[in-house]
Image: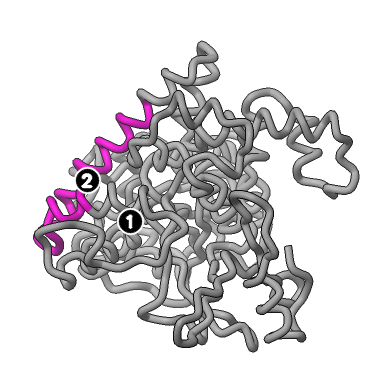
């Protein structure tokens, strides 16, 4: 499956200001696969160091962290030559060895000509035990397949080109085809293993089985968050968030029998692991939007549409039978989809507007920053209404861009 991040990896490879790169993202979004493919296509060889599968390799990062010494030892252990400019040094599952994260600083300072990449999940949990090399590494984030990537993966490259282009150029017939594909994507989602399972036999049920397996593997990962977080509370919040997309989050509603501080810690742990994403309310009077982010008023997105479908427990037969995509699961699937796409296009920075006035229910689902302008984005579900919140936003903030 071609991933759009391939282009960014090539830019990193060719950059004169290149630093060691960490590819971040939740588990099973395709980080390892993407970096291996990048290495095969762009280098003569890959020196792969899997720090989770091979615990003995972690000993390399004990004591002296000199880049030349580490490379020399790796050549012996991996039985291959590591040549700057020709070899990609790939530290996989780097969170399993916090000292390896620290070592990236010395690769930058002592061997800048060597291309060094790392992949990691749960990195924030590892960083508490590591000296973080601020200013000496670069980051990219990998998400599940977006809709255009999904279309390419299913072999419909012209549709991927169409959906990435100007909507005004799309004919009614192509629009209808894209709607049908989008409905399938709502239920399959963008986790590579689920897409692959669907492609193998054309069965949604196969994709659903994989989604269940991924959700269960995440639950097993919860043990890695403890003793920081209550494991059973994490499980409860994990499920509740899938049923709360599009709604303002109140901790008390995320799990019975747990205190608000315990629920808050569980929610923040899921966000750190990128299994969920916090979308905060902001004041759109200026940029950057994050400067006015509210600590108390926020919504949440799940990592992936397909996982949301599985965890929410929605009746698949009833919801899949709906012809109106905005009506599926009371509009929550549409809001999750738009948010998921915007996280990619907005490079992980996503906010919404909630009018902070007594007795006011005015809210705009998302805010998009395009060419320095803030654009309100409303995902309208149900019968067509007057879009009162959108009009109120435009009246209150006339300096903002077009409403979408």
Q: CA distance from mark 2 to mark 1?
A: 10 Å
Rendered position, 288 above or below 211: below
Residue 290 in percent (x, y) is at 52, 80
Instruction: Find out whether residue 213 is within the magenta segment.
Output: yes
Q: Say few, some or many: other residues with alpha carbon within 10 Å of mark 1 (under 14 / 14 to 19 / 20 or more).
A: many
The residue identified by callout 2 is 221
The overriding secondary structure of the stretch rendered in magenta is helix
N-terminal-most mark, 2 or 1: 2
Residue at x 38%, y 61% (from the top left corner): 67
Residue 399 in percent (x, y) is at 76, 86
Residue range corresponding to the magenta coloring: 210-236
Residue at x 42%, y 71% (from the top left corner): 298
Residue 202's mark?
Answer: none
In front of the other: 137 or 252: 252
Residue at x 77%, y 73% (from the top left corner): 371
Rendered position, 81 above or below 85: above
Marks 2 and 1 in Cβ contact (< 8 Å): yes
Residue 388 in percent (x, y) is at 66, 71
The residue identified by callout 1 is 273
């Amino acid at each position: 499956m071609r991933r759009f991040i391939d282009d960014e990896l090539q830019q990193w490879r060719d950059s004169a200001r290149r630093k060691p790169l960490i590819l971040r993202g939740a588990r099973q979004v395709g980080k390892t696969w993407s970096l291996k493919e990048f290495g095969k296509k762009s280098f003569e060889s890959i020196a792969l160091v899997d720090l989770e599968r091979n615990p003995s390799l972690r000993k390399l990062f004990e004591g002296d962290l000199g880049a030349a010494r580490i490379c020399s030892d790796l050549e012996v252990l991996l039985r291959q030559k590591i040549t700057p400019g020709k070899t990609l040094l790939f530290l996989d599952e780097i969170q399993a060895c916090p000292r390896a994260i620290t070592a990236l600083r010395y690769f930058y300072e002592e061997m800048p000509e060597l291309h060094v990449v790392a992949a990691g999940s749960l990195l924030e949990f590892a960083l508490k035990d590591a000296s973080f090399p601020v200013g000496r590494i670069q980051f990219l984030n990998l998400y599940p397949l977006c809709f255009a990537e999904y279309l390419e993966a299913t072999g419909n490259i012209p549709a991927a080109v169409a959906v990435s282009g100007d909507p005004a150029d799309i004919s009614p017939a192509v629009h209808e085809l894209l709607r049908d594909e989008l409905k399938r994507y709502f239920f399959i989602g963008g986790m590579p293993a689920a897409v692959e399972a669907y492609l193998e036999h054309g069965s949604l049920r196969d994709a659903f089985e994989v989604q269940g397996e991924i959700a269960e593997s995440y639950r097993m990962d919860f043990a890695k968050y403890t003793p920081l977080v209550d494991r059973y509370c994490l499980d409860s919040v994990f499920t509740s968030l899938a049923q709360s997309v599009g709604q303002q989050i109140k901790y008390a509603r995320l799990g019975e029998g747990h205190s608000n501080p315990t629920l808050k810690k569980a929610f923040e742990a899921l966000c750190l692991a990128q299994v969920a994403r916090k979308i905060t309310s902001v004041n759109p009077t200026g940029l950057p939007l994050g400067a006015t982010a509210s600590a108390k008023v926020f919504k949440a997105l799940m990592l992936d549409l397909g996982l949301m479908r599985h965890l929410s427990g929605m009746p698949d037969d009833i919801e899949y039978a709906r012809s109106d995509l905005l009506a599926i699961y009371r509009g929550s699937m549409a809001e999750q989809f738009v948010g998921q796409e915007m996280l990619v296009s907005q490079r992980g920075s996503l906010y919404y507007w909630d009018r902070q006035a007594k007795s006011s229910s005015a809210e705009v689902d998302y805010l998009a920053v395009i060419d320095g302008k803030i654009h309100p984005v409303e995902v309208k579900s149900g019968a067509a209404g007057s879009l009162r919140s959108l009009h109120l936003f435009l009246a209150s903030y006339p300096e903002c861009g077009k409403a979408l």
